[in-house]
Image (spheres, helix red, strand yellow):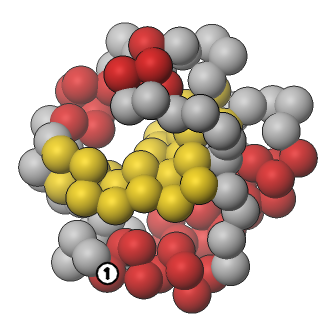
Amino acid sequence: MTASAGSKVLEISDANFASEVLQSPLPFLLDLAAEWCGPCKALAPLVGELADTYAGKVRFGSLDIDSNPEVPTRYQVRSIPTLLLFHQGEVVGQLIGAHPRPRLVALLEKAL
């Protein structure tokens, strides 16, 4: 998963997960996805829009589960897309599957 130009969605990997997500000073929404996943591709633009809307309040990232197996295993991710909302290093919310914007906004509001 490549962050699009101008997007505020960070590319997260097993290597930078702890420093970018767990140690984030702001809540962090992590999109666990894969290139071959249709619903993941459908959800990605919405995550990008929310990253713009919540800039300065919530950080956003995407992790390719095929290239980075440690994080999905650690959080027992069984299907994608999975959105994990972290705050102060802990998971405070989760959505599995593609959801409409209001569901994602409601998830983000849990951490604000």
Task: State left or right for residue 81 relative to residue 15.
Answer: right
Q: Identify the residue at horizontal 67%, vertical 42% (top origin).
A: 80
Q: Identify the residue at horizontal 18%, vertical 46% (top origin).
A: 90
Task: State left or right for residue 18 relative to residue 59.
Answer: left
Q: Identify the residue at horizontal 37%, vertical 12% (top origin).
A: 15
Quadrant of image for the N terminus: top right
Residue where numbered disc 1 is placed: 109
Crowding at mark 1 (Cα within 10 Å: few <14, some 14-19, many 20+): few
In the rendered view, would you say 47 is above or below 105?
above
Q: Position of residue 33 (x, y in %)?
A: 66, 37
User: What's the amino acid at mark 1?
Assistant: Glu
Q: Position of residue 13 (x, y in %)?
A: 46, 21
Q: Position of residue 75 (x, y in %)?
A: 38, 31
Visible in this render: residue 48? no
Q: In which quarter of the image is residue 19?
A: top left
Q: In which quarter of the image is residue 79?
A: top right
Q: Where is residue 26 in the image (x, y as percent from the top left)?
A: 19, 58
